[in-house]
Image (cartoon, rainbow, N blue to C red):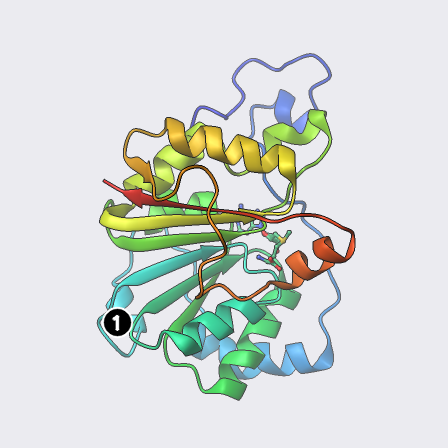
Amino acid sequence: MSNRITHPPENASPSEAKGRRIRSFVTRAGRVTPAQQRALDEYAPLFCIPFSSSPPRFQNYFGQEADLIMEIGFGMGETTAQIAESIPDKNFLAVDVHSPGVGSLLKQIGERSLENVRIIQHDAVDVLTHMISPSSLYAAHLFFPDPWQKARHHKRRLIQPPFVQLLTSRIRSGGYVHCATDWEHYALQMLTVLEGEPFLENTSNGFTPRPHYRPETKYEKRGKRLGHSVWDLVFACR
Ligand SMILES: C[S@@+](CC[C@H](N)C(=O)[O-])C[C@H]1O[C@@H](n2cnc3c(N)ncnc32)[C@H](O)[C@@H]1O
């Protein structure tokens, strides 16, 4: 991917100087609650798919053959669980890196008896690169990806041309990408980047009202309490 640093910039961090890919998340331990731990122990073997260096047969993991929607960065998973429950005839592949969130989503999968959600706990860039075959997804949801507000951190934002090119290559024609953010600078970047991808077409003239299937996310509610606006973008794949 072209956001891999090949020439260390001035003030490069040690990992950048070594040419490692810039990550869109920070690795933190995060406290797993006892309830999340119980869910991890009981449900991870049933609903988590291990990272692999080649595409698995996803249909073998899901109980039904259905369109596959990948959610990148599900946080604590409330939105994932609500959407999956309201759209039972689609399969949802939820990807995030943090254990408390994985435990939280597993708990909700158990409580709601959801059959159509599976989780991969791994960097979504690697998952897209290695585990998802071209044109095999129906859609991708990216709700409130980390905004990385400071200018010197903008390079950590997920929605950049190389990532969007990779993501779009994994979605079949007729599918879609749905992004949302409460950070205006990132919203404008998303609009520019998505409009610049030749295989995507905006379904609206600019931003779009929140689609009915997307409930308010935890992160979004916090943003609104701080007075932030919200921008949704839905692009169809050609
Ligand atoms: C700001 S939170 C938003 C969570 C949730 N979508 C919401 O709206 O409440 C962003 C999430 O994206 C995850 N994330 C960031 N980069 C990621 C990556 N490369 N792969 C998987 N998850 C990632 C973070 O761990 C975090 O849980």
| Observer-nearest of 95 and 147 | 147
Mark 1, other Cα within 10 Å: few <14 / some 14–19 / many ≥20: few
Q: How many marks?
A: 1
219 to the left or right of 168: right
Quarter of the image that includes the N terminus: top left
Residue 29 visible (yes or no): no
Residue to which mark 1 is pinned: 60
Quarter of the image that includes the C terminus: top left
Residue 57 visible (yes or no): yes
Placement of 214 over or under 55, stated as above or below: below
2 to the left or right of 24: left
Q: Residue at x 50, y 36 (%)?
A: 159
Q: Residue at x 71, y 53 (%)?
A: 223
Q: Position of residue 117 (x, y in %)?
A: 41, 72
Placement of 146 over or under 78, stated as above or below: above
Q: Residue at x 31, y 72 (%)?
A: 61
Placement of 163 over or under 27, stated as above or below: above
| Observer-nearest of 76 and 44 | 76
Q: Quadrant of residue 161?
A: top left
Q: Position of residue 26 (x, y in %)?
A: 67, 45
Q: Position of residue 235 (x, y in %)?
A: 36, 43
Q: Secondary structure at mark 1?
A: helix
Residue type at mark 1 is Asn
| Observer-nearest of 54 and 203 | 203
